[in-house]
Amino acid sequence: MQIKSETKFKVMIKSMAMSCGGIAKISYSDKLGKSHVREVTAEKKEKESLQKLELAAIAEALKILKPGCEITLDTMQVQIVTSLKLGWVEKWKKHDWTNAKGEPLANKEEWQQVLNLLGQHKLNFK
């Protein structure tokens, strides 16, 4: 089930990664003011970083939202927020997904997916 977007529809995505996998909780209120919470998970595969798990969980949360939501992202991975806030992700994209040292970006596919999905929404940070 997709969550519909509405005018001034606000969604909170709170994510975290643990040794067992990534979890994202989506909190929103419907037209009647009733609060809802949905949880999505990203399963841990061998030798995945916590950042990769959290990016995967965020992507899973974004997939169930219809375009046009106002999203507040709250994550335990400071680098995810910093990378989005400071425009690093856009720079990586512009430079063919390499970091400032010219090295291939870790978690490239996850970043690409999250960036693509975020492009459909208005993003805020907690």
Image (tube, rainbow, N blue to C red):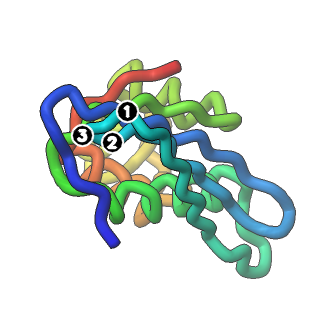
On the rendered structure, is 18 left or right of 69? right
Q: Mark 1 near mark 2, Cβ–Cβ under 8 Å?
A: yes
In this view, the residue farthest toward the right is 19
> For the point 64% across and 61% down, which residue is it?
53
Amino acid at pointer 2: Asp
Query: Which residue does the numbered mark 3 point to in the structure image?
Result: 69
Which numbered disc flags the more N-terminal residue, 3 or 2?
A: 2
Residues 14 and 30: in front is 30
Residue 126 spot, x, y in % from top left: 52, 19
Q: CA distance from mark 1 to mark 2?
A: 5 Å
> For the point 20% across and 26% down, which residue is it?
8
Instruction: Please tell me how crowded label 1 is: few (under 14), some (14-19), or many (20+) other residues with Cα within 10 Å.
Output: few
Q: CA distance from mark 3 to mark 2?
A: 12 Å
In what element is the residue under mark 2?
loop
Q: CA distance from mark 3 to mark 1?
A: 16 Å
In what element is the residue under mark 1?
loop
Circle 3 or circle 2, nearest the eye: 2
Amino acid at pointer 3: Cys
On the rendered structure, is 61 left or right of 67? right
Work out whether 125 lies above or below 114: above
Amino acid at pointer 1: Gly
**Mark on residue 33?**
1
Residues 54 and 95: in front is 54
**Mark on residue 85?**
none
In this view, the residue farthest toward the front is 32
Residue 104 spot, x, y in % from top left: 46, 56
**Mark on residue 30?**
2
In this view, the residue farthest toward the bottom is 46
Instruction: Please tell me how crowded label 2 is: few (under 14), some (14-19), or many (20+) other residues with Cα within 10 Å.
Output: some
